[in-house]
Image (cartoon, rainbow, N blue to C red):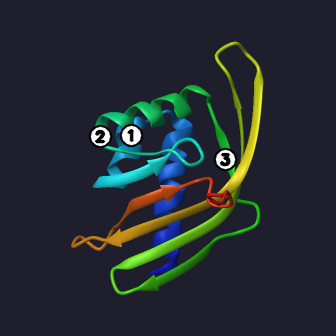
């Protein structure tokens, strides 16, 4: 099951890199909460779709060079992984960012995992 959680995150990331926002959305539960900016979580399909479209517009390339940590209890999993991302802003400026992804996933009746909480800025603590 640990590998299934990692595969879910990896497949969602690959869809984001391709700019396939519909597929990205399919990896999230209907009431998912995502932080597209540190400390500013959003919810709702429209806000999530807009956030993912903005990320996809950067033509991002993500790497998880330091591996993944997965913990599972029943139908809940936590995925933790440091990431780096390179992309290009609309004006052609190169973008390089990094962070610590902390995501909570729910096991589904079809045996898949879907992301319920997604914070790619998990290393940032609220003061």
Q: Where is residue 50 in the image (x, y as percent from the top left)?
A: 41, 30
Helix or strand or loop: what does disc 1 sit on? helix
Q: Which residue lies furthest to the left in this view?
A: 109
- In the figure, is residue 57 to the left or right of 32? right
* SS at badge 3: strand
Q: How crowded is the residue under tag 3: few (<14 C-alpha within 10 Å), some, or many (20+)?
A: some
Picture quadrant of residue 77: bottom left
Residue 37: x %, y % from top left: 57, 41
Do labels 2 and 1 touch, CB within 8 Å? yes
* Rendered view: 22 above or below 108: above
Tell me the CA gap for discs 3 and 2: 23 Å
Give whichever of discs 3 and 2 has the lower sequence position: 2
Foreground: disc 3 or disc 2: 2
Instruction: Give the labeled residue for mark 3.
Output: 62
Few, some or many C-alpha atoms within 10 Å of disc 2 (few <14, some 14-19, many ≥20)? some
Residues at circles 3 and 2 in contact by the CB criterion of under 8 Å: no
Neighbour tally class for label 1: few under 14, some 14-19, many 20 plus, Cα within 10 Å: many
Quadrant assignment, res 67: bottom right
On the image, numbered disc 2 is attached to which residue?
A: 45
- Determine the residue positioned at 64% across, 16% down: 90
- Number of on-image labels: 3
Tell me the number on the disc at residue 48.
Answer: 1
Relative image position of residue 41 (x, y in whole percent) = 46, 48
Quarter of the image where the C terminus is located? bottom right
**Residue drawn where x is 51% and y is 29% of the image:** 54
């Amino acid at each position: 099951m640990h590998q299934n959680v990692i595969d879910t995150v990896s497949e969602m990331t690959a869809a984001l890199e391709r700019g396939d926002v519909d597929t990205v959305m399919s990896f999230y539960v209907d009431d998912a909460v995502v932080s597209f900016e540190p400390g500013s979580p959003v919810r709702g399909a429209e806000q999530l779709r807009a956030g993912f479209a903005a990320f996809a517009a950067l033509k991002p390339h993500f790497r998880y060079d330091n591996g993944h940590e997965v913990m599972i209890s029943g139908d809940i999993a936590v995925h933790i992984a440091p990431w780096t991302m390179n992309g290009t802003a609309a004006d052609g400026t190169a973008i390089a960012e990094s962070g610590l992804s902390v995501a909570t996933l729910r096991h589904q009746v079809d045996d898949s995992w879907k992301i319920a909480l997604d914070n790619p800025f998990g290393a940032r603590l609220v003061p």
